[in-house]
Structures are given as C-alpha cells and as structure tokens.
Amino acid sequence: MIFYFLAVTLILSAILVVTLKNIFHCALFLIVAILAIAGLYFHLQAPFLGVVQLIIYIGAIMVLILFAIMLTSRISDRLLQTASRQSIPALLAVIVFILLALKSLDKTPLPAHIGKNFDPILDLGRALMTAYVLPFEVVSLLLLVALVGAIALARKD
Amino acid sequence: MLDFIIYLVIGIIFVVGSFAAAYFFSPHHPTDKKLATYECGEDPIKGSWIQYNVRYYLLGLAFVIFDVEAIFLLPCVLVMKSLGLIAFIELAIFIFILVLGLAYAWRKGALEWI
Amino acid sequence: MEIIVLSLILFGIGLFGALTRKNAIAILMAIELMLNAVNLNLAYFSHNLSNISGQVFVLFIIAAAAAEAVIGLAIIINLYREFHKIDVEEITLLKW
C-alpha cells in the first residue's frame, strides 16, 4: 500500500519532469520524484540512504539546479519555455528498451529474500573502512577534482 | 499501515483546511501597494524574477562538495573506535585531500564576498 | 520484483527525457532521474540479498552524481555566458 502510493507518485512526477514545458516546474517535480525515492529507501529498510537522498539531492543538488535555471534562462519572458524534439521515435525506442529488459528479467532467476537484517549505519561504515577503502579515498579525490574544475569554470576571468 | 493512512489524511486535511479557512474567512481588498513584493519597507524595483549573481553559485558549489564529504564521514566516524589506528589514518587521508580543495577555493577567492 | 519493474520504468522515462529535451539543464535533470533508477535497483538488491555492498555503491553513485551536477552546471553557465542560450541543438561550434 505504502509502496504503491510512492510508486504512483514517483512515476507521475517523473513523467511530468520530462514532458512539462516550463523548466522551473520540471525542477520542482524532480524534487517530488526524489522525495518519493527517499520514501522507497525507507521502505527498503535503508534509512541512512533515505536521509542521504534528502540531504544531498534535495538540500544540495536541486538547489544548485534551481540556481542554474535562474542564472541561465531568459527571465524577462517569464515562462522559461523549453521545447522537445522527435518525441515519437524516442518513445518507440524507450518502449522497445523496456520490453526487452522485461523479457530478460522474465528469464532471470531471482534469489528469494534472505531476511537477515543489518545495522544500516554501522555496517555501512565498516564496509567503507575495510573492503571499500580504496574507492572511499578515490571519492575524495573525485570531489577535489570536481571542486577545482567547477571553480575554474565558473569564475569570471 | 493504519498509522500511515491516518498521518496521510490528517496531513492533507491540515494543509488544505488551513488554506481553505484563510481563503474563505479573510477579506479581499487588493490594492497596488498590497500586491507589491515586500522589501522591508523599500519600494521594489522591477519584478522579483531577476537573474542571480554568479557569486551565489560559487558558494553553492562549494557547499555541495563539502555536504557530500560530511555524509561520507558520518558512518566512518561511528565505527572508528572499533577499528583503531588504521581507520584514523584512512580518514585523515580523506580529509587531507579535501582540505587541499578548500585551500584552492580560498586561494582563488571563491569564498570571498565582494 | 515490483521495485525492479518500477526502476526500469523510471529509467525509461529518464531516457526519454534525455533523448527529447533541447534545454541542457532539462537533459541534466533527466540524467538525474536515470541515476536514481539505478540507485533504487541497487538498494533493492542490497535489501533482498542482505548484502551491504549495494548500499555502499548507492553512496558512491550519489557522490558521482553530485560531482556531475556541479561540473555540468558550471559548463552550462559558461555556455550561457558565451552564447546567451543553452539549447543543445544550436551550440554547434564543434560540429563538422
């Protein structure tokens, strides 16, 4: 029940994100879609991921996207219109892709739910500090490169 | 399950009900002065849909990076005690690399406010 | 099982948006939808197999998405300064 409520919200708002004309409204519906995904994480017993989704996506990335919309659109006409092209071929391609993936999903044996529970934060931290320590350091390098690159790009010289 | 439905219904009733009450019970006498954007008493110049200065964007960008860093630190700090010195060294490397980024941003003046 | 189908549909919607939109920021938002579909799938398998690795990968993907948004939006703002538009069909400087 909770799952279906979240799923319907997610699909409807995602469709509005890719079809609405006003790009500002698209960004607002993207926030709704991300909220629904955070709810699904809680539903999947991954509460830390849900909180991360709220803090990083809604608190940081969406704010940045809204900033960029306000910085780059011609605000004077106030409608912030954006057009689409070649909708029907794209729709056909997407439908074929979904049908193929469903077919292959049908052929794949999925393992049954094991049901062992883990601590959502402590096990995550232990995995990050032991098995995944190299990717963990590489993430900090990735963030460093992103920061330096973005500052170099965005400054007015 | 039942609590979810109760929360949902009460939440919807609360929001819709308070807006509906404000709509039905409040008087409507709009004038030009009342409809203007509130600017702490100053007369507003042009509309509120203006282009923002790119300087705000630089601060937002630094914020996103360090927000992600904080999220990564939280689960690691919680298990640091049980893993000992090696975890401390790993975290120190992680923070050192990002301090380099902070130093770059500072040096280039991305954190300055002019 | 339902969640795999849900994330498949979400990925399809994001793909549709990335194929059809002309505004660069709208394309970036469609890509965010696709990344979220992948994250949902990983979280589902992590829950189903009782293996923490899925959640670790979701964290890494979120970090990569943040870096991608920061750099992509900085490039888009530079494009706007240079050409005064962010329509990907009209910016054809490198097109042969």
Image (cartoon, rainbow, N blue to C red):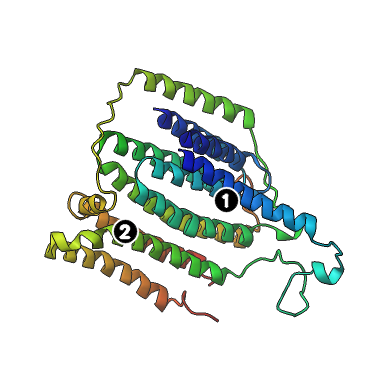
Give above or below for A31 relative to A154.
above
- Say few, some or many: other residues with alpha carbon within 10 Å of mark 1 (under 14 / 14 to 19 / 20 or more): many
Give above or below for A66 relative to C34.
below
Q: Quadrant of residue C52?
A: top left
Residue A78 visible (yes or no): no
Q: Which mark is residue B72?
A: 2
State the residue at coordinates (74%, 80%).
B41
- Say few, some or many: other residues with alpha carbon within 10 Å of mark 2 (under 14 / 14 to 19 / 20 or more): many
Residue B49 visible (yes or no): yes
Q: Quadrant of residue A102?
A: top left
Label 2: state its secondary structure. helix
User: Mark 1 is on which residue type?
Assistant: Ile
| Chain at tag 1 | C
Residue that numbered label 1 is attached to: C25
Q: Name the spot of residue A101 as percent of width and height, x first.
A: 42, 24
User: Mark 2 is on which residue type?
Assistant: Phe
State the residue at coordinates (58%, 57%).
A66
Q: Name the spot of residue B59 as percent of width and height, x first.
A: 49, 70
Give the total number of marks visible in the rendering. Answer: 2
* Closer to the camera in the image, A28 or A51: A51
Label 1: state its secondary structure. helix
Position of residue C73 in the picture relative to residue B45 (left or right): left
Marks 2/1: CA distance?
27 Å
State the residue at coordinates (25%, 59%).
B76
- The answer to whether the residues at label 2 and label 1 have Cβ atoms under 8 Å apart is no
* Closer to the camera in the image, C18 or A21: A21
Position of residue A135 in the picture relative to residue C92 (left or right): left
* Closer to the camera in the image, A32 or C63: A32
